Amino acid sequence: MTDLPPPSDQPGTTQSATFALIRPVLFASGIIAMVLGALLLAHWANPQLAAKQVEPPVASSLALPEPEPPPGLTAADLQGFQLRAPEPAAEVEPPSNDRYELTLRLEKGDTIDKMLDDIDVPAADRKEIDEKLQVLLKKKKLAVGEQISLIIQPVPDQPDVARVLSLSIRPQPEREYLVLREDDGTYRGEEKVHKVSTRIVRVEGERQGSLQQSGVAAGAPSAAMVEFIRALSYDVDFQRELKEGQKFTVLLEQLVTSDGKVMHPGRLLAGELRLMKRTVAVVRFRPQGGADGFYTLQGESVVRSFLRTPMDASRVTSRFGMRGHPILGYSAMHTGVDFAAQHGTPILAAGAGKVKMAGYNGGYGLYVRLTHTDQIGTGYGHMSRLGPGIKPGVSVRQGQVIGFVGSTGMSTGPHLHYEFYRGNQPVNPLTQKFALRAALAGKDLSRFQGLTKEYLAQLKSAPHVGDVAPPAKPQTQTKAPAKPGTVPQLARGE
């Protein structure tokens, strides 16, 4: 039986064709392998043949073509792949002798030993530092909130351990206590006393809202602005003359240590307020055998028997006389004057006297009544709270804070209801005439005139409080990280 060729669509056809193509290649490869094997056996048998160059026979007809180099990669070939960034070099740990500053705040229940323990200061160092500090303090207690300034250096080979190079505490601006590390590793205590001197500065501002708050915003201490307002209140009608945008200047005497730390923010020496039609100025002066007081530029004391206005108020919301009651809805006699003011504004005693009443009084709310003479008295209503020590029977000085503005009782908003009594009958406070004031004379007047000329010049030429160097403040730093890559921890108290 004769074999028939397989159909063209069967796998056998393809395999036979492929074998026929590679058969010559396989045959040539076998020949070459046999020749190389024979030469290798001859070489082992006769080493002298090693010196001769043996060239294998070349069969040009059987030589395989050299493979072509692979094509280069293009941007399209790299799509979908992400190249790995080179590994970052490891951070170099800072040298162990690097110094840094640290400021800690003394909290309730803290001790120096505990604070140093929290930052990993060795026990022996803590003990010696605490002993030296106690000798300096002489059994004085440190107040909660006191700042402890440190200069720290990590211990070599132990970066987690802190070495204290110096510790500083300054409970008073003029007195500083230090504990310093010596070269031999021991500690010594040292007390520094800073010289105190005076410095004159000025503060300029513009009234925006309360005159006191405007001064504080411009850089003046609150106590100095209160003095300024009291000195003006005898002569300035705050509710009529005081307007938004009016400018003022105050001259302050500060106490400053030799290293620039301010011990006292400023005592009022002089000040001027520029009103719409006039400028009012006051000057501090102490006459021979007398006490400090404020005077006009003509040498007259600003003090009168009564203040024109018992607070830093700028607007009268209701005057003395008949009016429609805002709550009751019918006309009634308004026996005083209402001054609009922010909640909590201090209320001053219009004159020296004695507290007749201090407490809740019906529609007046929280109310204070003062008796000044047998015939004259004043009343203050709708307070939010009383001033320190104000109670029936106590004496008060003119300008003393007797309470604070509120909206107690029958009130539609924070304000002061101010009443003035003559013979126990209410009269209009804004129409009352007040006593004349005393004036300087002789040598006191001569000294005052010289001082006034100097102060008026300094009101224009003294350095502004914002231009002088600020007091030295300890810089709060973060603790140096113990290991590269760790997050620094904030100093305590921040």
Image (cartoon, grey):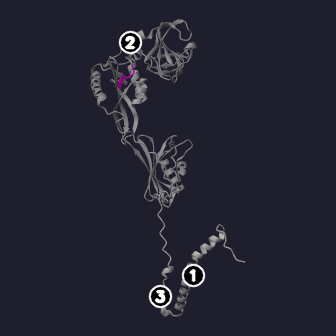
Where residue 49 sits: x, y (%)?
A: 48, 92
Taking 386 as reference, is 68 above or below it?
below
Q: Amino acid at mark 1?
A: Phe
Q: Where does the N terminus fall, quadrant-wise?
A: bottom right
Which segment did they paint magenta?
Answer: 243-248
Give yes or no for residue 244 being in the magenta stretch: yes
The residue that mark 3 highlights is 54
Q: Amino acid at mark 3?
A: Val
Q: Earlier in the sequence, mark 1 or mark 2?
A: 1
- Please tell me how crowded label 3 is: few (under 14), some (14-19), or many (20+) other residues with Cα within 10 Å: few
Number of numbered markers: 3
Q: Nearer the viewer, residue 275 or 74?
A: 74
Q: Nearer the viewer, mark 1 or mark 2?
A: 1
Q: Amino acid at mark 2?
A: Ala
Position of residue 457 in the picture relative to residue 349 (left or right): left
Residue 435 numbered tag? 2
Taking 43 as reference, is 166 above or below it?
above
Where residue 54 sits: x, y (%)?
A: 47, 88
Position of residue 320 in the picture relative to residue 246 (left or right): right
- Please tell me how crowded label 1 is: few (under 14), some (14-19), or many (20+) other residues with Cα within 10 Å: few
Q: Secondary structure at mark 2?
A: loop
Where residue 265 sits: x, y (%)?
A: 40, 33
Q: Nearer the viewer, residue 339 or 298?
A: 339
Q: Quadrant of residue 441?
A: top left
